[in-house]
Image (tube, rainbow, N blue to C red):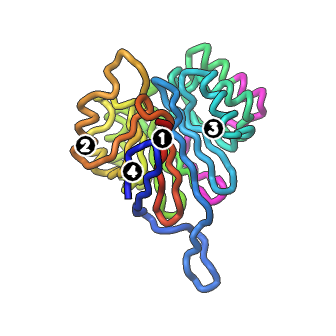
Amino acid sequence: MLALTTGLAACAGGGLFGGGDKKGGDGKTEVPAGQVVIRFLDVGQGDAVLVRSPEGKTLLYDGGRSPSRLAGYLQTYGVDRLDLMIASHADADHIAGLVPAAQQARPRLFINNGLAGTTQTWDRLVTALKDAGTTFQKANNQVIKLGSVKVRVIAPPAGMGDDQNDNSVGVRIEFGDFRALMTGDSEKPETQAWLAERRPEVEGPFQVYKSIHHGAANGDHPAWLAAVRPENVVISVGENNYGHPTQTALDLYKHNGVRIYRTDRQGTVTFTGSADGTYTVTTDR
């Protein structure tokens, strides 16, 4: 059952590695209780994804360009402490909103690509994180547990140089059989390198996937989408002069039968996933 409206959409999906990793007394796999909530926040032309585990543990992946909008979302969704903050890369449309998030929600752990930003926005973020007592780590394919949710950090491949987009940090979210994938502004050199490395973290299917680089023509490509195999794609985009999302990207998603959500048209898009792989989708409009 699928309702592509502001209402509720109930869908089913599979997983790559099966259920959770705990075994019961009879040797059967225990299915985690509760639901994981993944919100693709409407931050205009930029990315910001807020994840909450059934136990209330939180991840903020990027923060968009507007500090005030991101600060408002943290208040709206009752986030007063972040367990994990990840910056995919240091472009302003991904990190400006992380500054108030660091000030308000004092992240316990911050992960980035290890490339220092060169802007005042980056400097403000580093200062805010230090003031919050946050631990810094470079992306190194860590697996971080937020309660019953696994966050698999996908480090950029070697040899990407100093280009921020092609050093985007990806994340794979796992909750039982529910899977989500987001890889910042990765361009073809990075995604092709991940495919060449046969990285299991990017192998689908995924119930939800964030469009690369706001639907740019140099983001998603046929070989990559064939590996990821998403059921749904969320394009985080706002008013822009870049032509995002491009018709190239939209046609690629349609050709592969992927349901498309856009934050510029539907506002914040929320996926609520259960450990058996089923999920619901709600949108602001």
- The residue positioned farthest toward the bottom in the image shown: 26
- Disc 2 versus disc 1: distance between alpha carbons? 20 Å
Q: Is residue 2 magenta?
A: no
Q: Which residue is mark 1?
A: 283
Q: Residue at x 39, y 39 (%)?
A: 261
Front tag of 2 and 4: 4
Answer few, some or many: residues within 10 Å of disc 4's Cα (few below 14, many 20 plus, some between 14 and 19).
few
Q: CA distance from mark 3 to mark 2?
A: 32 Å
Q: Determine if residue 127 is in view.
A: yes
Residue 122 on image: x %, y %: 61, 20
Amino acid type for the residue under numbered disc 1: Thr
Disc 2 or 1, which lies upstream in sequence?
2
Q: CA distance from mark 2 to mark 4?
A: 17 Å
Task: Count how many numbered circles sit on residues in the image.
Answer: 4
Front of the two marks 1 and 3 = 1
Tell me the CA gap for discs 3 and 4: 32 Å
Q: Which residues are magenta?
A: 127-149
Q: Residue at x 44, y 57 (%)?
A: 10
